[in-house]
Image (cartoon, rainbow, N blue to C red):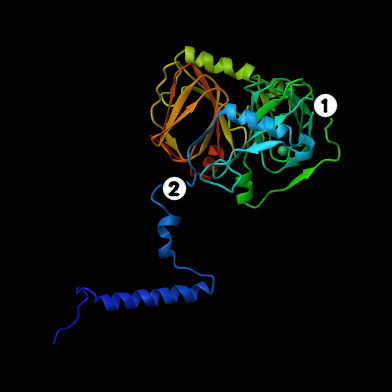
Amino acid sequence: MAVATATEPKSPDRKHNIEAMRDAFYDRIAKHHMAPLWKVMSTLVPDEPVTRCAPAVWHFDDVKSLVMEAGGLITAEEAKRRVLILKNPALQGESRITNTLFAGIQMIMPGEVAPAHRHVSSAIRFVLDGQGAYTAVEGEKAFMSPGDFVITANWAPHDHGNPSDKPMLWLDVLDAPTVNFFETSFGEDFDEPVQATRRQDGDSLSFYGSGVLPDGTTAMNRTPVINYTYARTRPIIERMMQTGEIDKRHGARVHYANPITGGPVLPTMGAYLAMLPKGFRGEPYRSTDGTVFVCAEGQGSTTVDGQVLEWGPNDVFVVPPWKRYSHTAAKQSVLFSISDRPAQEALGIWREGK
Ligand SMILES: [Fe+2]
C-alpha cells in the first residue's frame, strides 16, 4: 500500500481544500476586524519605494489663462484664497501633487485682499508673475517679485493684498497632506482681514540672513526669514556657476537655509534654487522625496522614468519619489524645487541614488 510522504505532490483536491479552509478562516477573522499579514506583506513592506504619483507638467500659458478666468468667477475675499489646485494626474480626487504635498496656483487681482488666517499647515510661495503684491506674515509685509520665495510657517498669521495695477500669480506649496496624515490640522480666520504690521519689508531677511544675528536670537525649527528674495539668491547661484561649482546632477544649486541652524527652512519642507548652464546634461538621480519643480528662467526638459517633460518659464512639474530623472537645459536655466526631504530626514527614512 502506498504511503503519502511530505515530498509527494499534494493532490489538486487537497490543495483546493486547504485554500478553501484558508478563505473560510480569512472570512471568519474579518468579522473580528483582523486580517493575515502574509496576504499583504509585499504591499506593506515592498522591496523598494512604490509611488502612487505620476510625473506631470503644467505649462504656464494654460495655467495663467485658466487662473485669470477664475478671477472673473470669484473674488479673493469670497474664495478666501483664489487657488487652482495642481492635482497629480494619478491621484484624481485628491488635493495633492505628491503624496505629502499640496500645490496650487494662487492669483490676486489689483485691489484685492486675501483675508488673514492661520493654520497648522506650513506654506511657501514661489512668485511667478506680477509685481508689488504683498504677503504679510507675523507682522512683516513682504512685497513680492518673480522668483521670491516666501514662507508662512505653522500657525503664522498671514494675509495677502495687491495694491499694484496688475494681477499677481504664485505657486503655493503646503505640507497639508502630511499634516492631515497625522490628523493634526487646525485653522482659524481673524476678525480683521488685514493684520497690523510692525516691520518693514525685508526686515527679517536683513536681521537674520546677513551673517549677523540680533542679540537674543534663539534657534527655532523653522527659519525666521519671511522672504528669500530672488534679487539676493540668484546672484549666488550665478556666481557658483561661474566658478564651476556645478553639481553633475543638480547644477549650481543652493538650499534655502534657516540662518540660525543651517538646517532647512521648515521641518516639513525644504527648497532649492539651481542654475543650469546652457547645454547642461545632468546625470541621472533619484531620491525618496517626490519633488515639485518650477522653471524660473530658461528652457529645457527633464526625463523622468523615460518620460520627457518639456519646460519653459513658470512651468511647474513634478517628479515622483524614487523615479530616476535627469535635467537638460537648452538655454541657461534656473530651477526652483521643493520637497518633503526635511521630514524624511528627521524620520531617518530619506535615501538617494543614481
Ligand atoms: Fe493660508
Q: Say above or below: 217 vs 235.
A: below
Residue sitting nearer the eye, 26 or 113? 113
Rendered image quadrant of residue 86? top right
Rendered image quadrant of residue 323? top left
Residue at the bottom extreme of this rendering: 1
Dot 1: element: loop
Indicate the position of residue 174 as horizontal and vertical percent values.
Answer: 63, 39
- Ligand 1 shows up in the quarter that is top right
- Within 10 Å of disc 1 (Cα), the crowding (few <14, some 14-19, many 20+) is few
Q: Residue at x 53, y 18 (%)?
A: 237
Q: Say above or below: 298 vs 190.
A: above
Mark pair 1, 2: CA separation: 47 Å
Q: Is residue 279 visible?
A: yes
| Marking on residue 198 | 1
Q: Say above or below: 352 vs 329.
A: below
Q: Say above or below: 3 vs 92.
A: below
Dot 2: element: loop
Inspect the image, locate mark 1, and give the three-letter code of the amino acid beneath it. Arg
Indicate the position of residue 136 as horizontal and vertical percent values.
Answer: 76, 29
Indicate the position of residue 140 as horizontal and vertical percent values.
Answer: 77, 27
Inspect the image, locate mark 2, and give the three-letter code of the amino acid beneath it. Val
Residue topped by disc 2: 50
